[in-house]
Image (cartoon, helix red, strand yellow):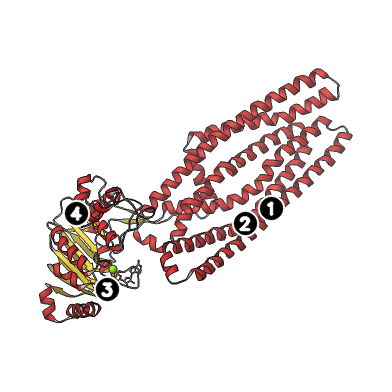
Amino acid sequence: MQTRVRTATSSTNVARVLVKLFKHMLNVWHFYASVVLMILATLLSSLIPYIMRYIIDAGIVRRSFEVILNRSSLLIALAAVSSLFRLGSGYVGSLATQRVVHMLRASAFESMLRKPVRFFSDVAVGQAITTIVNDTGRVEGFLAFEFRMLINAVFSAAISVVFMFYMNASLALVALASMAATVIVNAYTASALRPVADRFRQQLGNVASIATGDIAGIKTVKGLGLEKLESKKFEESNSRLLDIGVSMARRRAVLTNANALIFGLATSTILLYGGFATLRGEISVGDLVAFMSYMAMLMWPLSMLGLIIANIQTVSVSARRIFELIESGVEEDDDNCVELNNVSGEVVFENVSFGYTENSPVLKNLNLVIKPGERVVIVGKPGSGKSALLKIIPKLYRVSSGRVIIDDTDIERVCTESLRKHIAYVPQEPFIFSGTIAENIAFGNPNATVEDIIRAAKAAKIDSFVESLPDKYNTVVGERGLTLSGGQRQRIAIARALVRNPKILLLDDPTSNLDAETEKELLRDLTEISKGRTIIIATQRPTVAAIADRVVVLDSGCVAEEGAVSELLQRRGLFYRMFTSMVSNEGEVG
Ligand SMILES: Nc1ncnc2c1ncn2[C@@H]1O[C@H](COP(=O)(O)OP(=O)(O)OP(=O)(O)O)[C@@H](O)[C@H]1O
Ligand SMILES: [Mg+2]
């Protein structure tokens, strides 16, 4: 297979995810600057208790006014310079964070665009949006705060320990033991947070999915009077989120309280042990005060350490999802894929089988030869595989076996972009982007000139409608603008396809939203449009067959009949039955 799908190297464990995140930070120089400034700041501020010790022992105890004055001014200077460094470190640190998160968000989005179409039916849209918006936000918060705090805590602790040992080894051991206890207790309790955090995020995605689903289907919800039912469904999901959130809050609360307790214990142990040591004359009062200051100085970063460790667990969940989105299942062409240049537009299906899922084939061993410039209409009952047949031509989905061949080249071997350059595909339910009509048409070809756009609109018979609007082609449509009718949408989508000037035009049920009159009009125009290109139209309406050079009738994924309309009508088979039942139905209606 020429085009392969790269699968996820799922980084399941926290450390791997964090290392990955860390490597991203290493890519921006701001990060190094931030760390250097932070180390300098920490070094300077950890000199403060040491100087305090000197002020007490040499200044206060020995009643030297000069020592007190000199060293106090030094203290102020140190504090000032240290906080300046800290400020600088914070500033460049957040620049680093912003850059890294910006890059992650961009990669996640880009990677999402490169996923196979299949991805979007397997993954709930709410989950993907949560990853791109919320998870990146979560990582940003972590890098901006917890991550810096972590580095700060580690450096402060290391430097303080060195000073403490320098002053008195046994007292330092007591301090060290209490610090170790804090870290161990925190790390242990924090690991209990991880599964809850995972569930919380999962549930948040579920809540988002219900909301996006209901917003997208708001007309159906209102039309069927489902508001109460949907509210209830949402509330159920939302309550579950609340439950998980509450249990997460409870565990967090326990964590922070555990810290206060340990610090209380540590402080009193040092006071007790140090107090006796002072009385015995083993250490000076200055030593004891310096020790207490080091403990107090470490209090904040160490008490944060619990929260940081807990958040590392939760943020690793977010980071993992981002990396998974970035790395998993991206469609990639093989390095030696073939460029498809001028094509004549021949499309051959050779023993093609295809299914959306492995066990339910939609197309079965299908054989079909479509000549260059031919106008082929595919008819068949709902679910017979018409849309599937169109979707495999631009490789939106891959065949499970057999080959689709364009101008003698198996499309599996063709570079996807070069394949799609020759094809315009108008889906059954065309999408209108939020933007102007001109922009919506130009989506088909970013290089299109205004003349190209108008020509395509004229061919798609939407021009006179657009001209009747006050802002004409600059009318904003879609989410934040004018709402178009189904028929108008389809025509804009056809114009969007035509502006590409494709050699192969694929239309999926282009007349499903049109009345009989407009359908006739569009069909007449399609005859003109199709000159010089291959055009394949899938439809449920046998009347469309009127413009076909050849009609192909699909039945359960196989070609049941094919031939000119007149032939098929004479044959009195499946097509004949579809045609007559439709005509009689329309007769009843009319
Ligand atoms: N994204 C999907 N995932 C799984 N199954 C799908 C998907 N889309 C369609 N199917 C199934 O594949 C079969 C063929 O669908 P297809 O859309 O090709 O039919 P169709 O002939 O175009 O029908 P219609 O006339 O209603 O448009 C159907 O049974 C349908 O339920
Ligand atoms: Mg269809």
Assign ligand 1 to one image quadrant. bottom left
Give the residue displayed 35% in from the left and 70% down from the top: 358
Per the image, label 2 sits on a secondary structure element best described as: helix
Expressed as whole percent of the image width and height from the top left, the position of residue 101 reads: 48, 44
Of labels 1 and 3, earlier in sequence is 1
Of labels 2 and 4, earlier in sequence is 2
Per the image, label 1 sits on a secondary structure element best described as: helix
Distance from disc 2 to disc 4, alpha carbons, whole Å, reads 61 Å
Disc 4 target residue: 458
Q: Around disc 4, counting alpha carbons within 10 Å, would you say few (fewer than 14), some (14 to 19), or many (20 or more)?
A: some
In the displayed orientation, state which residue is furthest to the right.
279
Circle 4: residue type: Lys
Circle 1: residue type: Leu
Disc 3 to disc 2: CB gap under 8 Å:
no
Of labels 2 and 1, earlier in sequence is 2
Of labels 4 and 3, earlier in sequence is 3
Expressed as whole percent of the image width and height from the top left, the position of residue 489 reads: 29, 59
Q: Is residue 573 left or right of residue 240?
A: left
Circle 3: residue type: Ser
Q: Is residue 213 left or right of residue 567?
A: right
CB of mark 3 near ligand 1 (< 8 Å):
yes
